[in-house]
Image (cartoon, rainbow, N blue to C red):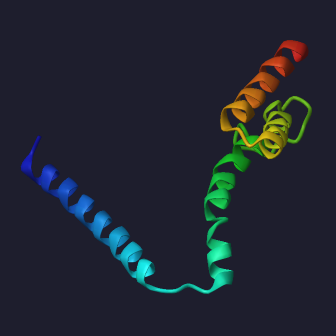
Amino acid sequence: MRGEILLTIAGMALVTYLTRSTFLVLLGRLELPQWLTRGLRYIPLGIMMAFIAPSLVAPQGNLDLSLSNYYLPAGLVAAMVALRWKNVFLSMGSGVGTVLLLRFIGG
């Protein structure tokens, strides 16, 4: 591997580490308002939904709310299982199982 590439990778890693650690160190010393702390708890859920929702409603890149889109009901089943039992593996398994069942039934 060329030296410039290794130097670029090391520089990118250093910049990433410094920007993230500086933010964490500063936030660790500040007392955040309660409303902000409550709001920050929902950031991971929002990010996860931003990744998942498009693949449920537009699996081929176009909006598909038809009965042939098995991902949408599977996502709803997985969400209900996750809300009820709060188990990641059970919710993933129920979503995959729903897709398989719908494909088996639908042909």
- Where 85 falls versus 106 (above or below)? below
Left/right placement of residue 90 relative to residue 72 reads left
Seen as rendered, the residue at the extreme left is 3
Residue at 68% across, 46% down: 52
7 or 86, which lies in front? 86
The one nearer the camera, 20 or 28, is 28
Residue found at x 11% / y 40% = 1
Residue 96 drawn at (x, y percent): 73, 26
Question: Quick check: 98 above or below 14?
Answer: above
In the image, 42: left or right of 106? left
Quadrant of the snapshot with the C terminus: top right
Q: Position of residue 54 (x, y in %)?
A: 71, 48
Name the residue located 81 percent from the left edge and 38 percent from the top edge: 81
Q: Is residue 62 left or right of residue 106?
A: left
Between 80 and 46, the one nearer to me in the picture: 80
Where is residue 61, by image quadrant?
Answer: top right
